[in-house]
Structures are given as C-alpha cells and as structure tokens.
Image (spheres, helix red, strand yellow):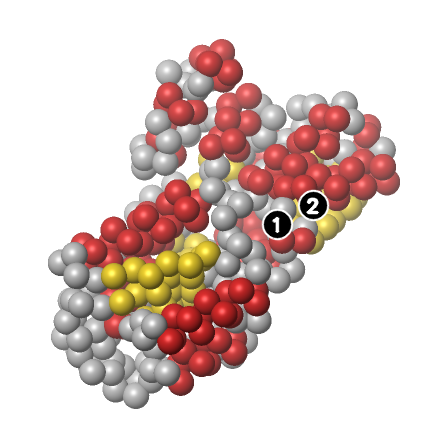
Amino acid sequence: MRRAAVAVAAGAMAVSLAACGSAAESDDNDSSDSAAKKGDDIKVGLLLPENQTARYEKFDKPLIEKKVKDLTNNKGEVVYANAKQDASLQNQQVDTMITNKVDVLIVDAVDFKAIAGSVKKAHEAGIKVVAYDRLAEGPIDAYTSFDNVTVGETQGKALLEALGDKAKDSQIVMMNGSSTDPNAAQFKEGAHSVLDGKVKIGREYDTKEWKPANANANMQAAISALGKDNIDGVYSANDGMAGGSITALKRAGINNIPVTGQDAELAGVQRIVTGEQYMSVFKSYPQEAEVAAEMAVALAKGESLDSIAKDKVDSATTKDVPAVLVPVVSLTKDNIKETVIKEGFYTLDEICTDKYKAACDKIGLK
C-alpha cells in the first residue's frame, strides 16, 4: 500500500473529521458515472466481517448507524449484515444489498481478495463502495482504517521496551493474524521492521481466522518445539489471540512474560491490569466509524470527498483511493484512564470488577 504523508504520532487522539455537506460534483476518481444528487433519504449497506471480536457489534455498528442518522436528519437508513467470518456469505450479502438497491456500501471484508468480484458488481450497479478497516480489492471509492504498519511498529517497540536490555538475548514467538486479511500483513511488516535483528524469533505463525483457539494451538506447538524455558515474550497481533496464547503459556507454567495485543478489548485491558498482558493497541473506533459514515453519506449524495479524505492509497487493483488513516496509541497499565475510559469504551467499574479490584488498586486505577 502506498501511503501519502500522514501525521501519526503516539498519543495523538484526534483526526480532523470534516462534515459532509459539499455541493461539489463527484470528482474523476469516483468509480461510477456522474451520480445524481440525492437528499437525506439514503440507504447505506453495512457489511462487517465477524462477531467474535467484540468491537464490531459493540462499537462499529452502532457508531456508524448514529453518524449516518446525524448526517441525514434521521432520514438515512443503515441496512446491516455480519458475515461471521465466511467470505462466501459476505459475497451473498453484497448481492442482497445490490438487489435491495442500497445507495452505498461500507464493507469490512472477510477476505480482501475474495470480495473483489462483489465490489465490481456493486460498481456496475452504480453503488459506491467504502472499504472499511481493511483495504478490499476491486473498484472501491474510498477507504478508512488505521495506519496498520504503524500498529505493528507500535507493538514491536512495546515488546522491545518490555524486554529491555535482555532483548538481544531473548527469544520470542510471533502470533500474526490471518493470511486472508491485508491488515495482518501490514501489522507483520511493521512488527518485523522493529524486531528483526533486535530479538530472536523462535517461531512465527499466521493464525487462521484470527481465532484465539488457533492461537492457543499454535502456542502449544511453539512451547513443544522451543521448550518452556526458552520463550521470553510473545508478539500477538490482537487481544483475542493474546488471550489464547496466554492460556497456553500458563498451562505450561510460563508466567510474567510480555505479550502484546491490539483492539483494547475488555478482557485484554483486564489482563493488562493484572500484568498477564503487557500492552494493547488502542484505536479510536469512534473516529474511524465517523469517517466511514461521512464518506458513505457523501458518496450516496453524489458529493466530493475532497473535504474528508486528504490522503490517497493504492490497492492491488485500484490506484489513488481517497483515504483517511486514523492514529493509534500504545495502551499500557499507565494510560488506561487517558484512553479507553476517557473515550467511553469502558467505565472504571466495568474494568475493575471484584475479580480485578486488588490489581486495579495496585496500579492506581481508582
């Protein structure tokens, strides 16, 4: 992916979110013929990839629905479907959305390559497509996500920080995401750019479907191959796989080694509180969701994206896609209040239940 210059600094919590209201005509990058202007009565198709990761149902869906309503004076409709990690089902869902004549699609692809044919069908039907969170192939019209290479770099830097002076003599296991997810490749790229040459990578896995159970099985294999006394840290691409990996580590009697994560899931934050997990990557889903909704509404109305998308990215099939890349933050026990609590992901009571009260008190989370 070619990225335009994007200011992404750890700790930067805001990105400029311009309101959709431009009267400008669609520009030359738009994928269909000059779209007729529409009012607020639009239909937005929202296709999310799975429901195992907590974020999609808890954050993305309701946030996008709310923003679409806000931008359309409560007249816009969001039609929702979840593919439950099934690429074939997601393709069928696109067909259904086309039949139902949605004005625009927001698609978080299960498989970024397998979705390309369906994106082309939508394009041919005059339906604009916003690639959400994952850079889908096919003639997409816009893209919003986080700077995924920076995510991997952030995780790698945190792991080296946790290992400290012992890093050069340490051996880690890398638990990457699914090979069908383009984001996973970018996380891996960023992590390797930081870790290679600084620490020994004993075993590395691309974890099928991002499933914690598969990460658990991979970690058991790594422990068997390397020996329980020869694993000093774990690069895990997300919190779910971190949980699966930690379960396997604990079962083998391996405790208190740094494990990374991503998504700031509640269970992950609680593991950070107890010290079982070292860090997660906090991503402001409200910002990402609002950008996706703004792009979708603008495209449905036949408006330009110039005031929203200041960057461009290339996929394998489409060049110069208007894009917004949202900053990320390294979440540790030291900034829980400033991240997930401040942005309303969780309350203090949700994190510090009776089970975690003593651990919260110990790190000053009160």
Residue 225 higher or lower than 142, as above or below: above
Residue 42 higher or lower than 330, as above or below: below
Task: Mark 1 and mark 2 in contact? Answer it, CB < 8 Å.
Answer: yes
What residue is shown at x 55% (from left), y 27% (from top)? 271
- Residue tagged by mark 1? 210
Viewport quadrant of the C terminus: top left
- Residue tagged by mark 2? 214
Q: Is residue 357 left or right of residue 222?
A: left
Dot 2 alpha-carbon crowd within 10 angstroms: few under 14, some 14 to 19, many 20 or more: some
| Whether residue 168 can be seen here | no
Looking at numbered disc 2 in the image, what kind of residue is underneath it?
Asn
Give whichever of 265, 4 is nearer the camera.
265
Q: Residue furthest bottom?
A: 33
Counting from the top left corner in percent of width and height, residue 243 is at: 61, 35
Look at the numbered disc 2 and give the secondary structure of its residue: helix
What residue is shown at x 24% (from left), y 54% (from top)? 67
| Whether residue 92 can be seen here | yes
Locate residue 238: give its quadrant: top right
Look at the numbered disc 1 and give the secondary structure of its residue: helix
Give whichever of 340, 125 is nearer the camera.
125
Counting from the top left corner in percent of width and height, residue 95 is at: 45, 74
Dot 1 alpha-carbon crowd within 10 angstroms: few under 14, some 14 to 19, many 20 or more: many
Residue 228 higher or lower than 262, as above or below: above
What residue is shown at x 71% (from left), y 39% (from top)? 216
Residue 34 higher or lower than 293, as above or below: below
What residue is shown at x 46% (from left), y 14% (from top)? 354
Distance Cα–Cα, label 1 vs label 2: 7 Å
Looking at numbered disc 1 in the image, what kind of residue is underneath it?
Trp
Counting from the top left corner in percent of width and height, residue 142 is at: 37, 70
